[in-house]
Amino acid sequence: MTLADFVRQELNLTGTHLGCEHGVCGACTILMNGEAVRSCLMLAPQADGAVLNTVEGLGESQELHPLQRAFQDHHALQCGFCTPGFLMTAVAILKENPTPSREEVREAISGNICRCTGYQPIINAILQVSKKSMETEK
Amino acid sequence: MTVGAGMDEINKTSQSYVGTPIKRREDVRFITGRATYVDDIKLPDMLHGAILRSPRAHARIRSIDTSKALAVPGVIKIFTYEDLGDLAVPVPIRMYQLPGLERYLQPLLARKKVRYVGEPLALAVAESRYLAEDALDAIAIEYEDLPAVVDVEEALKNESLVNEEAGTNLAAIHEFLIGDVDRAFRSAEYTRCEDFRVHRFTGNPLETRGFVASFDGGREELTVWGVTKLPHLNRQIIAAFLKLPERKVHFIENDVGGGFGIRGELYPEDFIIPFAAVKLGQPVKWIEDRREHLMAANHSRENRCRLEVAARKDGTLLALRATLYGDMGAYVRTHGGLVPCSTAALLTGPYRVPNYQAKIHLVVTNKMGLGTFRAPGRYESCFYRERMLDLMAGDLGIDPVELRFKNLIRPEEIPYEVGVTRPGSAPTVLDSGNYPSALKRALHEFDYEKLKPLQGRYVEGRYYGTGIACFVKNTGGLEPYEGARIVIGDRNDVAVYLSISMLGQGHETGMAQICADALGVPMDWITVYHGNTDTSPFGWGTFASRGTVMCGSAVHLTAQKLRQRLLRAAGEQMGVDRATLELRGGKIYRINTEAAPVDLNEIVSKVRHLGTLNQGSPELEETGYFHSSQMTYSYGVHLAHVAVDPETGMMEVVKYLVVEDVGRCINPLLVHGQTVGSAVQGIGGTILEELIYDETGQLLTGSLMDYLLPTSTDVPDIDSVILEEAPSPLNPLGVKGAGEGGIVGTGAALANALSHALADCRVQVKSLPLTPDRIRAWIRERSR
């Protein structure tokens, strides 16, 4: 069983989506020990003992993660199917580089496909959070 | 400027949700992973289906042996054509049913012959998807291969027939004539004839298709989750297929991962999954995988056009003559001849073309069937027309911008009747617009004059070019009505039930804005429901950029009707004439005063409990419909600036602008979202995507590694300008659809930009896509 199917079917965490099941679209991106992985390309036993983070753990509707709020602020989702994958990718991007440039964000999300938004608002949303993190560091 | 009657009504309530960039309220469930897409639905005892698809493009079926598959542990049943028995109907045509097309209907499961790679042959149902897919491998089929036809020209030779009984691969012809085209060509100072081609590509929503069907045998009621776009029509057809009354069939869309025209049409799977659920008495889920999606969900666009133009030497257009060939694939399904016919229907675009003739040939081949994809036909015809205008400008030594200004229909000529351009339809009438103004605005926003000196220049290893495309896009109309039911609940609570579905557009926010203004209540009182044939038994659906035009208007009118009803109840309660009252922000005021308002909730509560007010009825709700057979026409301009490396053929889209007049913008955030998203879809479709078949009819682009969708690094930030210069007179909100304007001109503008860039290399683009290998080949060919 793939890790994606395990997360969705055995753990009932259906926020992680499957868009292509061959590692191209990025909709199934989750964090494994803090790193973004494509859960459709892994078998569940490969995650034995690992810490997994999915979109369900990112924030609650009453207490949204700054990235979730930024996605809403910038209209960075339409159908919402790719969104969990983008959010988890964005968490990993900002962990590695908390103050990326626009072009760095563009490059970093180029492994995820969105069919609705044209990416622009997604980049804006991630940059909003990166700026905020800059401010809090000061 | 024409203002719809309803606009004054809105202003009276002095609220202004409409026109405001309000953040989407539906977002929260999506960003927290709590949305429910069809694959997220789990029912007790649910079984899983997998579909055996033909690996051959054209073959006779000698035998199908399912015995080994049935022996796989966990496999419940294998359905083939024979199992359908007396329910074996074909997938029907629902529109553009041109005479002749009825000979090419698709059986629900292949019978005797397979006609394209991906055609459904059998459905395996098992305890899990894994097991169902294993079962497919164990089904043995003997084929007798037949020669495949994968090209329109080959097909027209009729050497190998996709359907022998029809006796020809030319499924139908449709033609029309406006004015006297022959005379215009005889007397013209300038004529030119070109052959153009648009490639095959498709929408690829990120969520593939899927259904869960569940049959309650005791009550004989069927519920199907996952149906989108046209739930009511689909329900009608599926109910008839299963010989159930419509009211016993419940179609529920849940959350949907994008549609773009291709999702929600009736496919064979729409029949066989509910069929299996009824036969087995257990819920059945089927989720398409991406490979299946690429081979067996509607393809679109593929079309050829011989276009002839007649004009005066000064560039004044006199006539166009189009001879079109649509590659329909193996079967004609729900859309009939829509895609190629729509190519012809708006080919004259926003220009004054007094004489126009089109002849459309619909040709069957051994490929996947052709259906709609965002701006079907209009993307194609915009490319043909705008390329021809640029070629003509070059021939006549006229600036391409000047040529367009000369021929654009002037505002005083609007409404402008083009003539009858659609089979069995009323004349095409461009309802409102100021086309030259949109072009002026676009040139200004793009800094066109500044970029012009770069036209065709070679700078640091790359050629630069800028291309223009002007467009009109019919929106709304198409099917005659949409409706809304608005129900006042107990406290600060208004429910709006839409007759349409939502595939990512943001109706839960946009429709709430319209309702709040027209009803006179705070927007946060309102919850919008959609895509459910139980809560809204009548409706058509979400397509052709008609959601806001049709259903938005229904919400507006119904909310106004309900407001009058509330005021009457309040008048009774307060002992005053309702004409002296108004509803604002959820409170009842004496007209034009701020003093002592009565909370609407008090009135509602009295109506509920006393049962004597409101003509003795406890209900405070209204249902209403908006009818329109006429289309509104959005219009605008695309401008593209590209840089091309002649060594590699790589084209970078450096800058891109879409200007579109949507009549009236309900929510700028949503409208810009539609424009930018559809522009990127169009750019991707133009520079990256193509569904390629080899000569044996094998699909070579069956994964996202071969079929490239645009990613963030393939496209620039898109500049989007929304205009509201010409509200539509055809609906109370003045709106035009905003879903497709962003894609219509992408092929045309990019092809024009590339042709200008490569003027030195004498490359003139006449076919799409604009992939590096093709660009390189054109450069090589011309430099020989």
Image: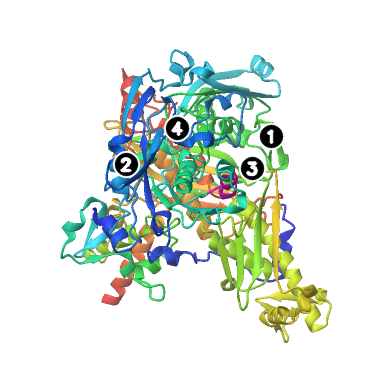
- The quadrant of the image that shows the C terminus of chain B is top left
Q: Mark number for residue B704?
A: 2
From the top left corner, tell me how far across and down residue A22 is, in percent.
27, 46
Give the CA distance from mark 3 to mark 1.
10 Å
Residue where numbered disc 1 is placed: B425
Amino acid type shown at disc 3? Leu
Give the CA distance from mark 1 to mark 2.
39 Å
User: Nearer the N terminus, badge 1 or badge 2?
Assistant: 1
Give the CA distance from mark 4 to mark 3.
37 Å
By secondary structure, the bulk of the magenta-drawn segment is best described as helix
Q: Mark number for residue B435?
A: none
Q: Residue B106 colored magenta?
A: no
Q: Mark number for residue B478?
A: 3
Q: Look at the image and give the residue range highlighted in magenta.
A: B229-236
From the top left corner, tell me how far across and down residue A127 is, in percent.
34, 63
Q: Residues within 10 Å of mark 4 (few under 14, many from 20)?
A: few
Using the rendered image, report if marks 3 and 2 lie on a common chain. Answer: yes
Give the CA distance from mark 1 to mark 4.
40 Å
Instruction: Identify which residue, A86 or A40, lies in the foreground.
Output: A40
Is B535 positioned to the left or the right of B647 in the image? right
Is B737 positioned to the left or the right of B589 in the image? left
User: Nearer the N terminus, badge 3 or badge 2?
Assistant: 3
State whether residue B185 is above or below residue B419. Answer: above
Question: Mark 2 and mark 1 in contact (Cβ < 8 Å)?
Answer: no
Disc 4 on helix, strand or loop? helix
User: Nearer the N terminus, badge 4 or badge 3?
Assistant: 4
